[in-house]
């Protein structure tokens, strides 16, 4: 039987997420991101399309590498203005019954104790439909906004993330026992103190005695997503992630990253089947090929190269305005995102001149899996990419809102369902069950967080 794929919508609480300049496209609703109804309408659309989840990216600073300043990012609305991704989840959860929500949150700047409660609160309110996309951030402005002079070194950010997750697992899995909450009105006992434990964490970066402030939610630990495909990022994903948003713009890079993460997961004692690997997908769909191509031409005419270069500059650390266009872009290690830095250097099949990289970036779809065509043609490419790379699904990027995702829901999803590649109905209650099967509400036994369930009382 054909492998069923997983679909997330890839979004961000801002005007210019990925398709920079397209806020000018007539009828684009992106400017409505500050209206709560924009989000509930989007959530209902995705639920109509039986999507697994809405995946919300986030950053905590302004992109200021390109042309050594923030002007371009602000003028072009490159992920600024940008609002908090957590706060749009409750209204969307109220407007839906099944759709999951994966929210990006960085382990580098805010402490784990308050974050653990925020995630437990959302897991309660969504009835087990919440996921956490674990990132370590890559913008110098974010570091400055949290009182640092500059970014913490790239690999040390992942060391902090390791301890951050340990604290989180202890709070989610090891503090409140099942059955701690008794709600015994006659005896006047809401919770049994003997079943609520300190976590007594003392580590290199965090000191958290506990106990957790939230009572156990359906999933306890939210589904753990991770996005960051550097060598250190892949090692982190192999140990912790249940779902990975892979970087890498080519089939070869995706295949290599996917294989590496699965091999490393097995080496960590995890069943590689307990990780779902997703790639970003830009799909422009028409009822006819001509219609799809006309949409592409209209979108391309408004696509902002300046905006894309500002985005790429922050992600990779490379200010392409400072290079000679005829120079070959060489890999240089920075503390920004190393997946982005590798894309046109180490991951490129041949050396690329800066001029070529700018041309590629300036072309819609230049950075990843991209398809323009009829529903059948899009489904054909989706089948091909899954077979060629071994990935399990996609984060479907919104170009024009809500057109892009509405086209995908109304035209591509039925074709995928017809081919037996995608669910026709939601069957599971929680997000983790949707990814791994009915009854699997909590972390599997082979996940490092599960170890804290077995630990003796920590008080
Ligand atoms: C596909 C993809 C999506 C990402 N999305 C975000 C994001 O929304 N916010 C963020 O701070 N970092 C994001 N990152 C970057 C990493 O998660 C992380 O911030 C890290 O510093 C850079 O990762 P890397 O060097 O392992 O690529 C993303 C990376 C990839 C590959």
Image: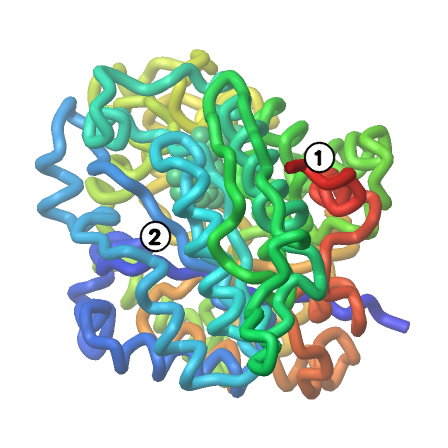
The residue at 30%/58% (across/down) is: 300
**Relative to 250, does residue 405 appear above or below in the rendering?**
below
In this view, the residue in front, 433 or 46, is 433
Callout 2 secondary element:
loop
Residue 429, image x, y percentages:
67, 78
In this view, the residue in front, 152 or 315, is 152
State which quadrant residue 403 falls in.
bottom left
Identify the residue position indicated by label 2 in the image: 18
Callout 1 secondary element:
helix
Identify the residue position indicated by label 1 in the image: 239
The residue sitting at the front extreme is 187
Q: Is residue 249 visible?
A: no
**Relative to 371, does residue 166 appear above or below in the rendering?**
above
Q: Is residue 73 left or right of residue 91?
A: left
The residue at 63%/86% (across/down) is: 414
Residue 25, image x, y percentages:
20, 69
In this view, the residue in front, 64 or 100, is 100
Q: Is residue 69 left or right of residue 105?
A: left
Circle 1 crowding by C-alpha within 10 Å: few under 14, some 14–19, many from 20: many
The residue at 66%/62% (across/down) is: 180
The quadrant of the rendering that contains the N terminus is bottom right
Q: Is residue 318 left or right of residue 246?
A: left
In this view, the residue in front, 16 or 291, is 16
Q: Which mark is residue 97?
A: none
């Amino acid at each position: 039987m054909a492998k069923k794929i997983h679909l997330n919508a890839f979004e961000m609480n801002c005007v210019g997420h990925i398709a920079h300049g397209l806020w000018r496209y007539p009828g684009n609703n992106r400017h409505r991101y500050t209206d709560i109804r924009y989000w509930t309408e989007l959530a209902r659309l995705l639920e109509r399309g039986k999507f697994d989840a809405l995946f919300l990216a986030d950053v905590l600073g302004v992109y200021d590498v390109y042309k050594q300043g923030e002007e371009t990012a602000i003028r072009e609305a490159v992920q600024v203005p940008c609002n908090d991704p957590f706060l749009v989840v409750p209204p969307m959860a109220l407007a839906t019954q099944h759709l999951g929500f994966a929210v990006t949150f960085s382990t580098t700047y805010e402490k784990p104790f308050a974050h653990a409660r925020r995630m437990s609160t959302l897991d309660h309110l969504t009835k087990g439909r919440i996921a956490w996309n674990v990132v370590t951030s890559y913008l110098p402005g974010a570091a400055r906004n949290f009182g640092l002079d500059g970014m913490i070194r790239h690999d040390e950010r992942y060391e902090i993330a390791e301890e951050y997750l340990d604290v989180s697992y202890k709070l989610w899995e090891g503090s409140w026992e099942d059955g701690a909450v008794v709600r015994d009105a006659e005896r006047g006992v809401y919770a049994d103190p003997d079943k609520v434990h300190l976590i007594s964490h003392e580590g290199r970066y965090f000191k958290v005695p506990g106990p957790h402030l939230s009572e156990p939610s359906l999933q306890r630990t939210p589904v753990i997503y991770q996005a960051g495909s550097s060598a250190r990022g892949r090692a982190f994903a192999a140990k912790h992630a249940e779902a990975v948003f892979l970087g890498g713009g080519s089939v070869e890079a995706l295949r290599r990253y996917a294989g590496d993460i699965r091999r490393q997961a097995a080496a960590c004692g995890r069943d590689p089947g307990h990780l779902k690997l997703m790639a970003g997908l830009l799909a422009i769909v028409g009822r006819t090929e001509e219609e799809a191509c006309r949409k592409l031409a209209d979108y391309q005419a408004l696509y902002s190269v300046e905006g894309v270069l500002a985005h790429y500059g922050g992600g990779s650390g490379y200010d392409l305005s400072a290079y000679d266009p005829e120079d070959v872009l060489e890999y240089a290690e920075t503390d920004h995102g190393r997946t982005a830095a590798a894309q046109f250097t180490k991951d490129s099949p041949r050396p690329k001149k800066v001029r070529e990289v700018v041309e590629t970036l300036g072309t819609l779809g230049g950075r990843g899996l991209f398809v323009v065509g009829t529903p059948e043609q899009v489904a054909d490419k989706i089948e091909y990419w899954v077979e060629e790379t071994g990935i399990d699904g996609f984060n479907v990027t919104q170009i024009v809102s809500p057109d892009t995702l509405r086209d995908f829901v109304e035209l591509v999803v039925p074709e995928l369902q017809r081919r037996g590649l995608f669910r026709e109905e939601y069957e599971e209650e929680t997000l983790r069950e949707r990814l791994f099967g009915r009854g699997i509400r909590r972390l599997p036994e082979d996940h490092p967080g599960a170890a804290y369930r077995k630990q003796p009382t920590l008080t």
